[in-house]
């Protein structure tokens, strides 16, 4: 594939896009792992949500 | 199950857990299809191979605006109905919308340098999109710095609704003012001015980016619900310690 005389600009655009998408995916994944871990720690210590404590789902 | 039942965070979490793997697979497959079409699309007769930047720039621009419109609907839900899931939706959309607007600005700049001879001009379209990006940063600052989450949510919702005025300004800026940025060429009266060999990969990439937005938004909403549960449990724990 010949990207012509402006190949640097095209490659830079796709590189930035890959970086932004990867950063967003990493953010939601790592945040999910962190929140699950904290919730697990709290439940292990016997802390429960009030709504669950009162018998609500 | 009625649609209103999904507004219950627990039911929403169950639905999100079920949908997310399928959405992620659909996103990857659509990107594979879209990128294949984008990389094999013919060069433009005027812009040459730099037209390949359009396959990133245009969907990013659409989703930057879509994100703000989604946040505006969520802001109404926060201010009028005070529904917690509306605030969750607004807060989760803000960083994603900001990232797509950033991508739109950067790819537009990288496209502008070889085509216009400059990375940036203060024309109405570029400036209004920069304003959108700054508004996103403002909303994020309100969410992240508010000591009391409810107050931050209301302030962010008000800023979101005020900032919604900028969306039609972005859309019609190329018609209302004389801009270096080209006028609308995809959705316009009389049909698209883009050749189908370039238009089809553009739509494929737009669908792929939209699927990515929906997947990330659903995942971010799930994280935000969990974060609020953590906060509620910590408050209960602190109350228990205080009364002991």
Image (spheres, coloured by chain):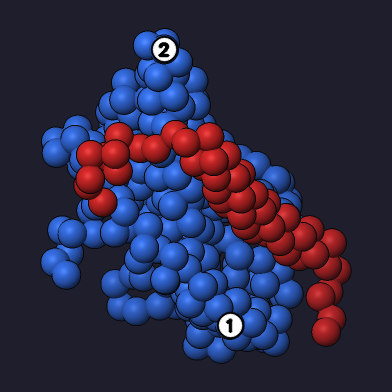
Chain colours: A red, B blue
Can residue A4 be seen here? The reply is: yes
Indicate the position of residue B189 as horizontal and vertical percent values: 29, 72
State how far apart marks 1 and 2 are (Cα): 55 Å
Q: Specify the quadrant that holds the C terminus of chain B.
A: top left
Side of B204 relative to B107 (left or right): left
The chain that hosts pointer 1 is B
Marked residue nearer the N-terminal end (1 or 2): 1
Secondary element type, mark 2: loop
Indicate the position of residue B182 as horizontal and vertical percent values: 50, 59
Residue in the image at 37% along x and 11% along y: B243
Q: Which residue is mark 2?
A: B244
Residue in the image at 49% along x and 41% along y: A43
Indicate the position of residue B106 as horizontal and vertical percent values: 66, 49
Which one is closest to the eye, mark 1 or mark 2?
A: 2
Q: Nearer the viewer, residue B200 or B79?
A: B79
Q: Which residue is mark 1?
A: B29
Indicate the position of residue B237 as horizontal and vertical percent values: 44, 24
Can residue B75 be seen here? The reply is: no
Would you place residue B73 above or below residue B48 in this image?
above
């Amino acid at each position: 594939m010949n990207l012509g005389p402006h190949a640097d600009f095209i490659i830079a655009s796709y590189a930035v896009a890959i970086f932004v998408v990867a950063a967003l995916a990493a953010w939601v994944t790592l945040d999910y792992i962190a929140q699950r871990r904290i919730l697990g720690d709290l439940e292990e210590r016997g802390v429960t949500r009030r709504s669950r404590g009162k018998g609500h789902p | 199950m009625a649609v209103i039942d999904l507004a219950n965070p627990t039911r929403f979490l169950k639905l999100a857990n079920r949908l997310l793997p399928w959405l992620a697979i659909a996103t990857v497959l659509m990107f594979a299809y879209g990128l294949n079409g984008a990389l094999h699309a013919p060069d433009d007769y005027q812009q040459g191979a730099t037209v390949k930047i359009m396959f990133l720039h245009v969907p990013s621009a659409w989703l930057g605006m879509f994100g703000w419109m989604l946040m505006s609907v969520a802001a109404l839900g926060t201010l009028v109905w005070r529904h917690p899931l509306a605030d969750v939706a607004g807060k989760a959309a803000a960083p994603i919308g900001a990232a797509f607007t950033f991508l739109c600005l950067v790819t537009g700049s990288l496209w502008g340098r070889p085509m216009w001879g400059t990375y940036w001009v203060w024309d109405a379209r570029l400036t209004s999109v920069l304003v959108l990006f700054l508004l996103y940063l403002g909303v994020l600052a309100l969410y992240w710095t508010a000591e009391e989450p409810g107050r931050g949510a209301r302030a962010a919702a008000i800023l979101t609704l005020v900032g919604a005025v900028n969306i039609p300004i972005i859309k019609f800026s190329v018609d209302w003012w004389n801009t270096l940025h080209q006028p609308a060429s995809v959705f316009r009266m009389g049909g698209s001015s883009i050749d189908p060999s370039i238009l089809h990969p553009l739509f494929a990439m737009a669908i792929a980016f939209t699927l990515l937005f929906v997947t990330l938004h659903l995942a971010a909403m799930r994280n935000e619900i969990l974060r609020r549960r953590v906060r509620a449990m910590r408050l209960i724990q602190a109350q228990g310690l205080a009364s002991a």
